[in-house]
Amino acid sequence: MPFRKSARVEILNQSKKPISLLYYNIDWVKKEHVGEDTPYFYTQYRQEYPVQNGKDYVLLDTRGKGHYVGTVLSVRTRSPAWFGEGDEKIYIDGEQNASIWGTGTEDYFLSAWGLKTTGTPYFGVPYFDQWGIVGGHTSAYRWHVTDPIVFNTAIKVTFEHYGWMSPDENPKYESNSWNEREDDYSSVAFWYQTGTPTFEARAPHDRTLPSLDRIIAAREFTAEEYHGPGEAVAQSLGIYPEGQLFYKPDSPEDAWIEIPFEVEKKEPKRLLLVMTRSYDYGKYQAYLDGVKLGGVMDLYGEDISTREYHLLDFWPDPGTYKLRLECVDKNPASAGHYLGIESVRLRRRRPRVSQYRHDAEKDWRENPILYR
């Protein structure tokens, strides 16, 4: 990060929590002279929650002379299936048509046929939680260190936001790879340039992703009427700030829990559970008002972790519903049949699901659907 006269480094806490500990280390080298043609280092943060229909997502748009050296892109999916088909399109020196036009987001990050957690010196995916769900999180990076993108007067770096999508978000009720998706994007562009940069966007103070969920906290349902033989308690757990419901059945034969919830308005929702995985947890089957949803959920894990289990896409009528989990077995590696659940959640679908109304009159009890 070259500088000629001075440099100032600031750390600003924009969270709602105080910083209790802070450590930093700054290394710098003093030179007798920095050439007039030495480019300065810049970064640009942007976000769109969600990305705009009909417009490619813009990471950087600046005039000057320099070279582009890196991208960090983070995506929260707002639709089922896969977001990573949109091409990168990079316009050099005021081009009307991009001279650098790739073959897909996943390809740009050098991980063709999808992304998964990985790390190398020049590209990687440090965070990838669950593939294909509504509300999945991905963060990927690529450094153009050995392949810098050079520009003389201007550069514009963009990504299309196309991908696979569920048929209830398609006007023709089709599922294919060329849908314009409406996911939540944020990014950081890295580049060097000479002269005064012209990029205008600045990082907003509020970068928090908006909540998609109506949350029914499981810890509220520990009374005997909500579970089979055994003990159910509200348990503090580091992965859940507000705790979870922890159920210890007397035996697996009659082990179950139930969590009721209310629906006030008929609108498209996704039903999912935030569950715990641990070394002594069992296998459970989910039911909604007696209707079996999905397959058996194996809650065993070598370490304590959290995972979302997505069950149903539906248009529930107003009324009271009852989610039931029944123990069916345990993983051979598990030491017990315990269960931990943080919440039942009703997650919002994109507005176009309401617009097209493909499934509005379908009876989810007759044919429960989960789009993937």
Image (tube, grey):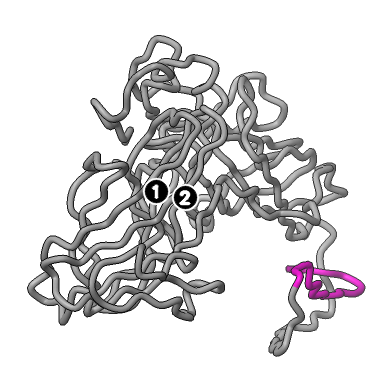
Number of callouts: 2
**Foreground of the two, 31 or 315:** 315
Q: Circle 2 — which element?
A: strand
Name, please, the residue furthest toward the top: 172
In the image, what residue type sits under mark 1? Leu
Q: Is residue 266 visible?
A: yes
Task: Give the percent coordinates (x, y) of residue 102.
Answer: 45, 32
Residue 9 magenta:
yes
Above or below residue 212? Residue 240 is: below
Residue identified by numbered label 1:
272
Task: Give the percent coordinates (x, y) of residue 241.
Answer: 55, 74
The answer to whether the residues at label 1 and label 2 have Cβ atoms under 8 Å apart is yes
Residue identified by numbered label 2:
345
Q: Which quarter of the rendering shows the C terminus?
A: top left
- Category of crowding for the residue at label 2, using alpha-carbon neighbours closer than 10 angstroms: few (below 14), some (14–19), many (at least 20): many
Q: Circle 1 — which element?
A: strand
Q: Which mark identifies residue 316? A: none
In the image, what residue type sits under mark 2? Arg
Q: Is residue 294 left or right of residue 57?
A: left
Residue 201 magenta:
no
Task: Please name the residue shown 24% across and 66% down the image.
Answer: 299
Q: Which quarter of the rendering shows the N terminus?
A: bottom right
Task: Give the percent coordinates (x, y) of residue 280.
Answer: 22, 79
Looking at the rendering, the stretch of residues picked out in magenta corresponds to: 1-16
- Category of crowding for the residue at label 1, using alpha-carbon neighbours closer than 10 angstroms: few (below 14), some (14–19), many (at least 20): some
Task: Please name the residue shown 62% across and 48% down the image.
Answer: 186
**Foreground of the two, 108 or 13:** 13
Above or below residue 344? Residue 229 is: below
Above or below residue 348? Residue 219 is: below
Task: Give the percent coordinates (x, y) of residue 293.
Answer: 25, 42
